[in-house]
Image: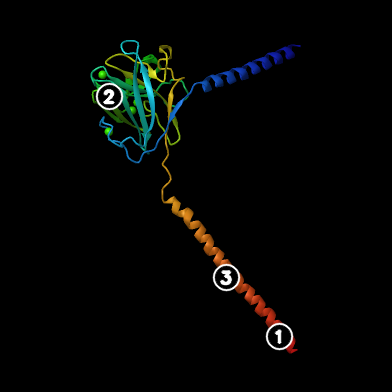
Amino acid sequence: MKLKAVSGIMLTLFVIGILTSVFNERSVMAEPVTSLSAWTSNPPTVDGVLSLGEWDNAATVEFVIKYLVGEPTTNGTLYVMNNADNLYLAVKIEDDNLNIGDVLDFHFDNDNDGIREDGDDVLGFDVNYGFYDSFWRTDFGLHGHMEDSVDGGTSDGASAASGDGFHNFFEFSHPLQSGDINHDFALNSGDAVGFLIGYDYDGRIGWHWPSNLWSEYLDFARRGEIIVASVPPPVGGKAITIDIPMINLELQTIWMWLSIVILSLVLTVVCIKKRKRGFR
Ligand SMILES: [Ca+2]
Ligand SMILES: [Ca+2]
Ligand SMILES: [Ca+2]
Ligand SMILES: [Ca+2]
């Protein structure tokens, strides 16, 4: 009886476990993830100016940052692309003045599992300070991050900003493999990294897109993802596909002539043999 009871409990726990995992999976699947991926052979100049054609190869998404104080929202566009060495990011965002208090930042989920972990990468540009390459650690609290260089790491990449009186513009580069393993992501082709994007507007702290609620502040359950693009195949590959039928054609011609020669030889031998028989 005891054994049956234990088996019954085990079976119940097993079924609950399966149902829980299915439920969790559905919960995760219910969150739409914006995925961005684009290759560029022409790296941008990180000068804070989005020059004509400079970001034409990028994958883009429109985003909205919400605020509790002042204007409730501001709209932006994110541009994402990579080459073999770097991830490149640019942002165009509604703001009539590039001034102290404007801060654009990216918080990354290095392994894109929806959970924030020690060493997750953070990048930003603070008008009061400039570019910073930071990282997050549990003991920093929800909002905290520290510059890599303060913790024995290295500052990797660059950023710059400008404004035209209507929008502010930001450009970033950051190595896919900086080697600063405790403070930066390390990405190969095809890898996905989660991200949140935040913008403090004249000192007003905003939500981190794609979060919708303050309760989701810096919660990676809802996030965007960047998939590192691979090198596209060389254009010269087309020549090979054209050459193959030509080679086949040549082979067919050779086989045809060989067949004719062999057939002729066989006929000649048969004729000779017949003549010999006739002489006898
Ligand atoms: Ca530029
Ligand atoms: Ca501003
Ligand atoms: Ca670093
Ligand atoms: Ca970092």
For label 1, the residue is: 275
Mark identifier at residue 257: 3
Real-space Cα separation, disc 2 to disc 1, in angstroms? 99 Å
Picture quadrant where residue 174 is located: top left
Q: In the rendered image, which residue does mark 2 sit on? A: 168
The image quadrant of residue 173 is: top left
Q: Dot 1: what SS?
A: helix
The crowding category of the residue bearing disc 3, from other C-alpha atoms within 10 Å (few below 14, some 14 to 19, many at least 20), is few
**Which label is found at residue 198?**
none
C-beta proximity under 8 Å, tags 2 and 1: no
**Mark 2 vs mark 1: in front:** 2
Queried on whether the Cβ of the residue with tag 3 lies below 8 angstroms from ligand 1, the answer reads no
N-terminal label among 2 and 1: 2
Name the amino acid, label 3.
Trp
Q: Amino acid at mark 1?
A: Arg
Classify mark 3: helix, strand or loop: helix
Q: Position of residue 7 (x, y in %)?
A: 71, 16
Q: Quadrant of ligand 2?
A: top left
